[in-house]
Structures are given as C-alpha cells and as structure tokens.
Image: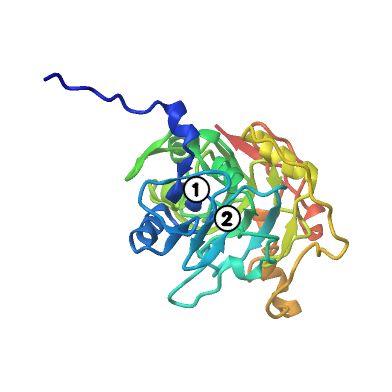
Amino acid sequence: MTETQISPPSKKAEHSQGERLHKVLARCGFGSRREIEGWIEQGRVQVNGKVAAQGMCLQARDQVRLDGRPLAWQEPDSIRVLAYNKPEGEICSHRDPQGRASVFDALPPPDAGRWVAVGRLDINSAGLLLFTNSGELANRLMHPSGQIEREYAVRVFGEVTEEKVRALFDGVELEDGPARFHDIVDTGNAGINRWFHVCLLEGRHREVRRLWESQGLRVSRLKRVRYGSVIIPDRLRQGDWSELDTAQVTALAQLVGLEVPAARPQSAATPAGVRRGRRPASSDRAVRAGRTDPAGRTDPASRTHRTRRTARTARTDRTDRAARKPVSRRR
C-alpha cells in the first residue's frame, strides 16, 4: 500500500485562515504571548461562545472573551497616539504585585480596547513614552526590522575616552548579542558626570545602560527624548500626556509603511494633557520636570541635540536658551 503524502499548507492558505489567537491578543496589549497561552490552556478564553484551543486562528468577525468579558481585538477605525512624559519611579506594566505607580494610571480611558505601550522604559528611566490604540502600529514601531530611531539623553559617570566612544559606535558584544549606538553626540560639558545624546535602532532590555557598562561606565540618569518622528514636547511636564494630531500620527505611521484610517472628529472637551498627583512645590518643580539638577544647575539633557539624519531646533527650557552651547559629534 502506498502512503499518501500531505503537503503542509501554503503561507497564503495560512494567511487566509487568520492569525493565531495568542499573537493577536498579545499584539493588542492584553498580555504577553506566554501569558495568553496560559489563559487559553486554563480555558479562560472563548471565541464565538466556545472555549478557545491552542493554535486556533481569528477571523475578522470573531468575538473574543476573557473570563466572560469581551475583548476589543480588532484594529480601530482611527488611530490615536498619546505622548507621555514618564517620571522616574513608574513602571510600564498594568499590574504590579508591589503596588508601584504605573504609567497607565495617568492615561485617559481609550474609546475602546486598551492603550498599547510602544516600547518600555525601566523604573529608573524617564522621558518619552508613546501609547496607541493600534496594536499593529505599536508592533511595527517596536520591531527591530523597522529600524526606528530611539534617542536618549544620558548622564554618564566615569572617564569617557575617545576609545570607549569609538567602541560603542563600532559595536560591542553583550550577553544577548552584538549591539551598538547608531549615533553618539557629546554635549560638550566636562567633568566626571558627562551628558551624551545617543541613538538606537532597537529596544532591547536596558540596552543603553548595558552598552555604557560594557566600557566600565555607569549611567546615572537616562531620559528618552525622541521616538521615530516624535520629539518630547517642551510644554509636556513629567506625569502629563498629550495627544498627537493627525499630521503627527500620519508621519509616525509612514515610517513603518502603515496606512492611517480617517481621523476621528476631535472633541472640544478632549484635554490636551492630564496632571495627576500633587503639584510639586516651586523649589523642586524644576528638578522633577528635568530642567535642573538638585543643585540648581541647568540640566544638559534639555539642550540642543542633533542626529545624523535630523537637525532640529533647540528643545530647551527658556532658562537655558540664552546660554546654549553647540554640541560636537563623535564618530
């Protein structure tokens, strides 16, 4: 008797069957793939009223529930993006066993579904975080193949030599593979604590800190100032958010080849930003906003910075503009 060989389904056929359930829900920000696989294994996820099985795919009209609650997993009719100025001390998770403050606590409720964070910042880092209601946009912006620039202002403790800067620009070997800075800009200040602006084209865990540590140096302060085409706004204080306008969202989506649906009508009642928690006293407001250090000196993180492909106007505080110094690029 001859055996009949069954060829595996083509990629086109797999695409027509939809996308794996756990991948879709993870991309929409409901949890990690491993976490969602655990929910499916426990029978907590239902699709069209039936308990979901591992490996099943979703179709456009499928209804998904978690513990009986409906999940809005379809891509939204219009894409929204929020820019949030994260202070140090906040985590980038929805839930924390230790009860620490989360960046999601400060955000407005979305029209539907949930906000998806575009990348992360560790608890000791500050600066720009983007949130969107589009899992597809978030996934493309975070994926290494997108080659999206992330720019950081970094205060480095230790002796920074030309050889160390060259090594970081050429590339070093970390525990999870080779890594390098796409651009390194010296702000021109001197001393044991020096400020640099650096660019990465990926977002691995603590990559900026680990790169400097590979040269025997320590990052004493880290602030993200740009993600792709979005620069952290001057007016955005720590703990505040603002919503990108249609032109900004379109520019961001075009970086990753995503077509932006028609924008939703903006409500006049939609606030430009939300402040939470106590207002800092005048004596420490500048410190918490990142404009001065505790000794009252102007923070070089707010000075002019440039990258290889983008020359921008100064994003400094008014107190720093009069005394702004030119930056020098190290290659």
Mark 1: give few (<14), some (14-19) or many (20+) Cα within 10 Å.
many
Q: What residue does disc 1 label?
A: 24
| Residue 113, percent from left and from top | 62, 59
Pick whichever, 87 or 221, lies toward us. 87
In the rendered image, which quarter contains the N terminus? top left
Could you tell me which secondary element the residue under label 2 belongs to?
Answer: strand
The x, y position of residue 178, in whole percent, is 38, 37
The one of 277 and 289 positioned closer to us in this rendering: 277
Q: Residue 63 or 175: which is nearer the viewer? A: 63
Density class for disc 2 (Cα within 10 Å; few <14, some 14-19, many ≥20) is: many
- Inspect this view and state whether residue 296 appears: no
Report the residue at 71% width, 51% height from top. Answer: 80
Is 177 placed left or right of 76 in the picture? left
Q: Position of residue 144 (x, y in %)?
A: 49, 38
Secondary structure category for the residue under label 1 = helix
Q: Nearer the viewer, mark 2 or mark 1?
A: 1
How far across and how far down the image is residue 199, in percent? 56, 41
Residue that carries the numbered disc 2 in the rendered image = 117
Name above or below for residue 268 compared with residue 225: below
Residue furthest to the top in view is 2
| Quarter containing the C terminus | top right
The residue at the point 21 percent across, 22 percent down is 4
* Tally of numbered tags: 2
Q: Amino acid at mark 2?
A: Ala
Residue type marked 1: Val
Query: Quick one: which residue is furthest to the right in this view?
Result: 268
Asked which quadrant contains residue 126, the reply is: bottom right
**293, above or below 3, in the image:** below
Label 2 vs label 1: CA separation?
Answer: 15 Å
Left or right, 245 with respect to 31, comes to right
